[in-house]
Image (spheres, grey):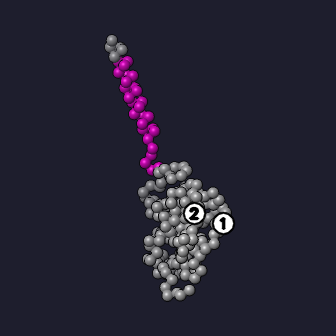
Amino acid sequence: MKTELRLITTLIAFVFLGCNKNQETNKVPENINFPIIGKPIIQPTKKNENKIVNIEQLKQIVPIDTVNTKSTNVYEKYGIEFTGNCYACDLAEISITEKTIKLTNICDEKENKNIEIIEIVNNKDKINIKTKHSNFIFSKIDTAPIYELQIIGENIEFKNLRISKYYTLKKILNKFKEHDCGDFQG
């Protein structure tokens, strides 16, 4: 009877410890964030947080340009692109949702195009948004934040939706020295 009791106790302890061990090995690491579409995105640690490009930041970004290359002040170095914003009105504002990249004319919100997103990959200071024909790579190049956009693959060309090289958050545009068309009557 003692032998059977020891055997049962040993089996119960073995099963219990085995179950606990499996729970630990099946646990999802805390630094993995499951993306909207595609493979898991491994987020950098908090010490690199100031370099991380967050997809939430790219919900609504507006085109800007280099206006004073010699300035070290980001708000003086960049500003609106005068021709595209004030004269031709052909630039595209970008809004990114979980499923689409929406290009909207800076002067006429009724003029827009949606591009379906296949996958979003976050790599430290870059976000690569893959679409059917192109990859949109947003690189954070300054803390303001300023994003440089590179498109790899098919050229994205829509009438009156010209894509700029640089973008910033719409909500901080007024911090830039040149942030509107001023008294231009074009």
User: How far apart, in angstroms, are the residues tagged by discs 2 and 1?
Assistant: 15 Å
| Coordinates of residue 38 in the picture (x, y in percent) | 55, 50
Residue at 39% over, 22% down: 11
Horizontal and vertical percent position of residue 101: 55, 62
Q: Residue shown at 61%/74% (left/top)? A: 160
Three-letter amino acid code at the position of disc 2 = Asn
Task: Spot the residue most to the front.
Answer: 110
Where's residue 32, x and y in %? 47, 49
CB contact under 8 Å: marks 2 and 1: no
The quarter of the rendered structure image containing the N terminus is top left
- Classify 10 Å Cα crowding around label 1: few (below 14), some (14-19), many (20 and above): few
Question: Is residue 65 positioned above or below 31 on the image?
Answer: below
* Picture quadrant where residue 106 is located: bottom right
Give the position of the C terminus as an image quadrant.
bottom right
Give the prevailing secondary structure in the magenta stretch: helix
Q: Is residue 97 magenta?
A: no
Where residue 155 is drawn, which disc sits there? 1
Q: Secondary structure at mark 2?
A: strand
Give, as a single range, the part of the protein colored magenta.
6-32
Query: Vertical placement of 76 versus 134: above or below?
Result: below
Residue 115: image x %, image y %? Answer: 59, 61
Q: Dot 2, crowdedness within 10 Å: few (<14), some or many (≥20)?
A: some
- Labelled disc at residue 114: 2
Given the current orientation, which residue lies at the most extreme right position? 154
